[in-house]
Image: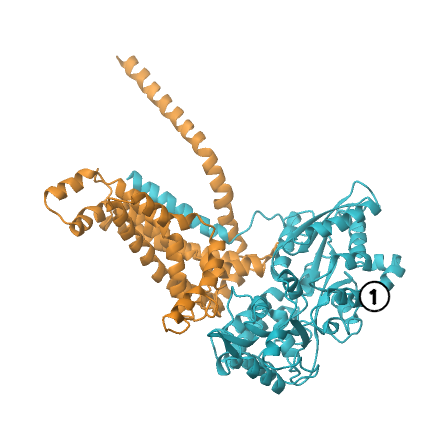
Amino acid sequence: MKTVTKTAGNYAAKKKRKDTISAYIFLAPALISFGLFIGLPVILSAVLSFFKYNLVNPPQFVGLENIKKMFTDKGLFTAFGNTFKFLLILCPIHCGLGMILAFMVYRAKRFQFFFRSAIYFPSIVTTASVAIAWGYLFSTDMGAINYFVRLLGGTNIPWLTDRVVVYVTIALFSFWKFIGTTFLYYFIGMQNIPDVYYEAAQIDGAGIIQTFRHITLPLLSPTIFFVIITNIVSVFQIFDEPYLLTNGGPGTATRTIALEIYQTAFQDMNIGYGGTISFVLFLIILVITIIQFKGQNKWVVYDYE
Amino acid sequence: MKKKVIALLMSTCMMLGLAAGGTVAAADPDQAGVKKNEVTRTKAGSSDVTLTLAMCGDGTTKESLDKLLAQYTEETGVKVDTIFIASNWGEYCTKIQTMVGGGDDLDCAILAIEGVAKFLDMGIAEPIDDWIAANKEISDAILSDTSPSFQDVFKDDEGNTYAFPFSFNNVVMHFNTSRLEEAGLELPAADWTKDQFLEYCEKLTTEKDGVKQYAVAVPYGEYFCAEAWLYNNGASYMNEDFTESTINSPEAVEVFQLWQDLIYEYGYAPIPEENVSAIAQIINGQVAMGSWGRWPTANYIADDFKDVAIQYLPTFTVNQQIGGVDGIFTLKNSKHIEEAKELAAWMSQADFEGQYLSSGNIPALHSLAQTKISDLGIPENYEIFYLDSNTDIYKPVSAPPQFTECSNIVLTAISDICVNKSDVQETLDNAAEEMNAVLADNK
């Protein structure tokens, strides 16, 4: 009996080891590419923070010079401020309106395919080409939108030339261009909610708002959590919209941290300082994300199935 | 729990991806730096040599360039691959720098004044003094026919020469002549003043079919063109040895204030916008005047626009022509230095320039400019493009080794003043402070 147990134990251990090896083999391509193209550059980015480097001449060790520079760099503070403004504007738009849109389309009895396609379509169009088109649409003197504004008796709206209005313009563009992705996450999340809950709610006489509030919202919380985290990370990286529509202007009004990194590292060729800024940004996002993960226990429902 | 782990993994990937955005590929100093003593100097004319030439532009001239270079291959046996990089000069220089740093085989590159000091500072370019000494007749013919001011741009502090002037631009005022006619105006005299300029602006600001037509476009996003205005008021972005910013001098403030007033005080100029081309606006008549070099002629031809004339910029306190020049540089990393120098010199001579440069930049060879520019026939008064191109009348645009940083500071200040309507003195004081920090390395 003992021998049988021992043999069975050996077999189980062998199988476990074999499974582990298989798992590592299957994971290897992803792990190697992640390590090579993401992990290694992150480490290099941190290392380069201590160097002055222009890609051509050998790096020069400058100690904490780049970190000290950050504290006196007014442009950097402006860029951080602008990025936080975008965070406050764009995250609620994407996370909130994306969910409302998804719920409306999910509940729609007709034309669901049309709405899904129409909302997602801008996400697959090249940002650069549509941004140029939007630039023309929003032009103060020559733009189509102001043409209609004038026809209706209004005066030209400085869509891209006023430091406040420009945020509205970028928010509109961002909503149109990128809402499709958030919408898709929510839509899939809603499809994963078992129908049985909705059927029970219907039997109990719940209305659409009650159903949304008491069934959709809690059961969608893992998706909401994921969307919020990814949105915050992507807004911290916001680059396309301000770069293509305003180039960070007017003045420095829409200059974001990603634009600052791009200019510092790849235009001024100050790779060391660019690396410092991006590493600090990484740390900021890391802290925010850790806080979000700690806080999720209070509102995210995972085990409902 | 599984979902928690997946969410955690995906978020971590995104964050790491973000941090990775600001870094570069592995950098072995020996590989990334300028390669030392690895140059294989092959004899000119070897048929197995292929050179790589980088040009700035969208590639519309690639076909004609490749055809001309095929002639070069026929003459010398050296093949030439061309790479066109579509961007402005600042970004083009960055791209070349990245290519050199990344170890790409690049033998020659066209380089404008904006990037010269930076390239010399980094030791990317190879001097051509030995070629000049060995080919005295050809080099004398080029040097005696080009502006000494431009030749100086391609020399380092020790007097080594790195390239011949290839093409150049001065900055002049372009006029839509239909708009001038409608306003009953003639092309102004060469020595027109600021007051006369404002009179023109007054008369050229009109309304057509309910849409405002403006007199002038301010030089938005144009480091080179904007400094041309400053020069005419005895100002500039920085001092001549690039050690201190002068962008907040009273003379400079006056010019920046004028631009702001043209937009907001007088309403003579539209608020400039990032995606709106002022050249397109002059072609469609929405603005009547704009300050550029000769490069808009390419747009004029493409749009079959002929109602255009040019004149010097109005004199404020002086009339100082600005100049921006480019040249074909040999890169130090080239494995075929001698062939690369031969190619660069061949391209700087009249035969090649004459066939390659039609619209766009002005050929640096004065004799060639005379014929090429008149051949095109537009704009009216085109002689002023080349009239002084074999003299030292031009003052080169301010191009320190930190050109990209300074250019960004200037363009942000222009945007702040002309779009944001910021206080001119305060904005320029801040710009000067930023620029001084950047220029401190030159002291």
- Residue B166 location in percent, x, y? 75, 62
Q: Residue furthest bottom?
A: B195
In the image, residue A245 sits, relative to residue A226, either above or below, namely below
What residue is at 14 percent from the left and 44 percent from the top? A201
Chain A: its colour in the image is orange
In which quadrant of the rendered view does residue B10 lie? Answer: top left
In which quadrant of the rendered view does residue B111 lie? Answer: bottom right
What residue is at 49 percent from the left and 52 percent from the top? B21
The residue indicated by pointer 1 is B143
Describe residue B424's horizontal placement relative to residue B77 as left or right: left
Tell me, yes or no, if residue B77 can be seen here. Answer: yes
Q: Amino acid at mark 1?
A: Leu
Q: Quadrant of the C terminus of chain B?
A: bottom right
Describe residue B346's horizontal placement relative to residue B171 as left or right: right
Chain designation of label 1 = B
Describe residue A18's horizontal placement relative to residue A72 as left or right: left
Task: Write down which chain is painted cyan.
Answer: B
In the image, residue B271 sits, relative to residue A265, either above or below, namely below
Q: Secondary structure at mark 1?
A: helix
In the image, residue B428 sits, relative to residue B120, either above or below, namely below
Describe residue A28's horizontal placement relative to residue A198 as left or right: right
Q: Viewer-proximal residue, A303 or B215?
A: B215
Q: Quadrant of the N terminus of chain B?
A: top left
Tell me, yes or no, if residue A285 can be seen here. Answer: no
Q: Viewer-proximal residue, B349 or A50?
A: B349
In the image, residue A258 sits, relative to residue A11, either above or below, namely below
- Residue B26 location in percent, x, y? 57, 47
What residue is at 66 percent from the left and 78 percent from the top? B313
